[in-house]
Structures are given as structure tokens and as C-alpha cells.
Image (cartoon, rainbow, N blue to C red):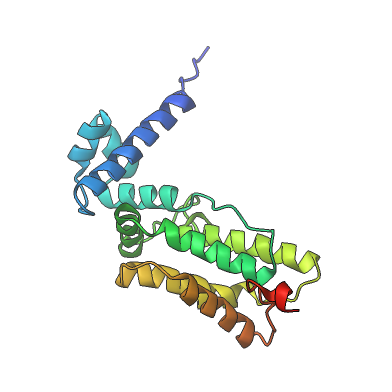
Amino acid sequence: MTETPQKRPRGRSTRVKNAVFDAVEALLIERHGEIPSMLEVAERAAVNKTSLYRRWGDIRNLMADVAIDRLIREEPIPTGGSVRENLVTWAMSIARSMNNQHSLSLLRVMAMTPQVATEERDIMSTPIGRRLEELDQMLEAARRRGDVVPSAGLIAEVVLAPIYMQALFAGSPQTLEGTTRRVDRAFLLAGIEAARDCAGKDATG
């Protein structure tokens, strides 16, 4: 009778992955965004470097996986206000998530690393893909309430893309005023009058 090879416990594999990803983030912060070597990551994570090469191949693939994992953490989808107010809140939460050195470093790694064609790494497994999923959920909820909303593609182009572009090339965070203007522009381009959520509106009638 042939014995079935024992598989590595999933829990141990997850612990190793988390240790490696934490090591990459820590090294990025310490080095102000400078990409570490595989050996340095292995030493910090207390993992054999051979395991890193076997799993990721090189530092670029490892960095890309860290970037995908860390930058697609879900942001809460706001539902309490009008669709305009919810879009501004959502966009600002994404902008704030980019407002630190290691997030910027990971984002730049994503921009510079060629995407590997695998089943596990498609557009919807990237930071942009996850944000598009959130956007679709938010717009669908608004449509169910009877709201007229811009298309997801238009919002992605006018609101979402500038957040990542400004983080990548300017290294400065989005302001509330700038984000609000972009959301309003998306409504304008779609020919929709956005409900204004201005303080004191009710008081003035």
C-alpha cells in the first residue's frame, strides 16, 4: 500500500508567511522604503532563505505579494449618508491608508513589479481590484435605495485613480476638499445632481 505524502500543516505555512511579510514591512520602515534582500528578510523572520527562494523565487515576487496582501486590507464601506457623502468618506479612508512611508513603498513596488500571470494574482486580487469591489458594493446599495449614481468606471477614473497617482508621484495625501471636488466632478460628468451634505443645511431650510 502506497503511503500518501504528508502535507505541511496549513497553520504553520500561514505563520511563516505572516512572519516573512511582517519582516519585510519592518525592514521597509527602518530603511525608509529601501527594498531589503532575501537574506535580510530571512534573518529578520527567522526563516531559512532557501524556503523564501522556493516559495517566491526572488525579492521582487516577494515584495509584490507583500504589497498585495497589505494594501488590499478591506476598508469599511460607509452606508450611513447619501451616496455622495459615502463616496467622499470611502475615498478619504483609502487616501489615509496611503499616508505613511511603508504603504508608499509597497505601492511603488506594485507599480514597478511586472504582474505574474497566475490564477492567484489577477486584477481583482490587487489593491485596485479590491477597491473596485468595494465601490461596486457601495453603488449597488445606493441603487437599491433608488439613488441615481455615476458608473463605477467613472468614479474609478475621476476619484480613485488620482489617489494612487498622487501617492505615487507626489508623495502627499489627498485633502478632503480635493476629494470632495473629484466626487462632485464624477457626478457632474455623469449628468447627476449630487445631494449636498453641508453642515447647517437643515438649519437654513
Q: Indicate the position of residue 73 as horizontal and vertical percent values.
A: 49, 49
| Residue 181 appears in view | yes
Q: Nearer the viewer, residue 112 or 86?
A: 86
Q: Is residue 122 above or below residue 87?
A: above
Q: Is residue 170 above or below residue 109?
A: below
Q: Nearer the viewer, residue 176 or 15?
A: 176
| Residue 49 appears in view | no
Residue 152: image quadrant is bottom right
Q: Is residue 10 above or below residue 61?
A: above
Q: Residue at x 32, y 43 (%)?
A: 56
Numbered marks: total: 0
Q: Indicate the position of residue 61 as horizontal and vertical percent values.
A: 32, 50
Q: Residue at x 27, y 42 (%)?
A: 26
Q: Residue at x 50, y 15 (%)?
A: 2
User: Residue at the top extreme?
Assistant: 1
Q: Nearer the viewer, residue 141 or 9?
A: 141
Q: Residue at x 48, y 52 (%)?
A: 72
User: Residue at the front extreme?
Assistant: 203
Quarter that holds the C terminus: bottom right
Q: Indicate the position of residue 103 as horizontal and vertical percent values.
A: 35, 55
